[in-house]
Amino acid sequence: MAQSIFMAGILVGGPVFGELSDRFGRKPILTWSYLILAASGSGAAFSPSLSIYMIFRFLCGFSISGISLSTVILNVEWVPTSMRAISSTSIGYCYTFGQFILSGLAYAIPQWRWLQLTTSVPFFIFSLLSWWVPESIRWLVLSGKFSKALKTLQRVATFNGKKEEGENITIEELKFSLQKDIDSVKIKYGLSDLFRVSILRRVTFCLSLAWFSTGFAYYSLAMGVEEFGVNIYILQIIFGGVDIPAKFITIVSISYLGRRITQGFLLLLAGGAILGINLVPSEMPLMRTALAVFGKGCLSGSFSCLFLYTSELYPTVVRQTGMGISNSWARVGSMIAPLVKITGEVQPYIPNVIFGTTAILGGSAAFFLLETLNRPLPETIEDLEDWHQQVKKSKQEPEAEKSLQTIPLKTGGLDPS
């Protein structure tokens, strides 16, 4: 029950913090999210009743959405295109190592109240440290905060040993370089704009399905560790450890093969592995476990890829709103997964058929998205539309040339036959 309430908080926090971040900035949302998590987590440790504990757990999940979304967006909007895949996936490793640290803390601190307090108090410090995180220059410029954008750029330039270059930048240069984007964002954008334009509708639908299927299938494997006939403690360690090679392979793949093909095949492979578990008899627990671990690794890589891919597809003006909506579908999937598990009481193979098929559908949807490898981030909705038109045109030109090559030529009005 407490875990479902926690997931509900993440679900609600995604769209709420997404829209707030696009309106008020990434940095303040990050700072306040850290503070809310620290306060609500500490409050949960001292809860006098179950109902109050549930409220605090909801707020914990709610604030985690703000932290994860703001962190990913700030990373994408600050890091150069060539390093974006590495930096984004490195953030994913923090989740993996956090799981290992939490396991050690849980072993060392058996009383849940002290464990809850121990894991919550550090976020008060993180809230203070986040004041040194620079706000997104893209967001500042597109919000008309030119003076603050200039000061932030100069501060970052000084930190990077480029103080002289930073001092030479002027507000006029900032305005001139981004004049087109500045003119196009005089209108305030919100949640409804994700469905106003056809290409944004497609991006939102396909990403939402990919996020849903990833969360749906991921938690199906996480909840089914006792079904494989292997020591569950050893399996938990293996499930955590597989993230390390899985995310490394994901870094390599998204850097060289691209985001779309990586995202699509990760979900297709995960779906195939989950369906394959049904084909292996229960007398072969190691084979069933191997398929589950492989599927879990693919889904872990899918999460890493999705965080980067989603933030690269949405324009700056609606980036965090889109990220919040899409990411929330993973939480919907994680909440529905336990209900689907119940269908196993009718026929044991039904849950894996549903989980595997959904993952395959999510992987198929990824192939309808644009490829973002080595592409600059779209700043406005118009940028995304122009990009889509360029892709359509580039696909039509080879087809037109091929059609011309198949037309027989006639010379002098005479038919050679």
Image (tube, rainbow, N blue to C red):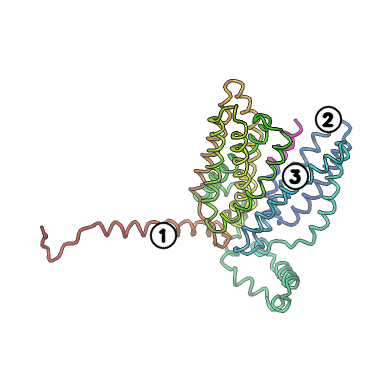
Look at label 3 and name its amino acid: Gln
As rendered, which of 317 and 57 lies closer to the eye?
A: 57
Disc 3 crowd rating (10 Å Cα; few below 14, some 14-19, many 20+) is some
Q: Which is the main secondary structure of the residues drawn in magenta?
A: helix
Look at label 1 and name its amino acid: Ser
What residue is shown with label 3? 99
The number of discs equals 3
Disc 2 crowd rating (10 Å Cα; few below 14, some 14-19, many 20+) is few
Residue at horizontal 54%, vertical 57%? 372
Look at label 2 and name its amino acid: Leu
Q: Residue 352: horizontal and vertical position, in percent?
A: 57, 31
What residue is shown with label 1? 394
Q: Which residues are magenta?
A: 1-11
As rendered, which of 87 and 74 lies closer to the eye?
A: 87
Question: Mark 2 and mark 3: span between their CA atoms?
Answer: 25 Å
- Between circles 2 and 3, the one closer to the viewer is 3
Q: Residue 128: horizontal and vertical position, in percent?
A: 83, 56
SS of the residue at dot 3? helix
Is residue 20 shown above or below 270? below
As rendered, which of 210 and 228 lies closer to the eye?
A: 228
Q: Which mark is residue 50?
A: 2
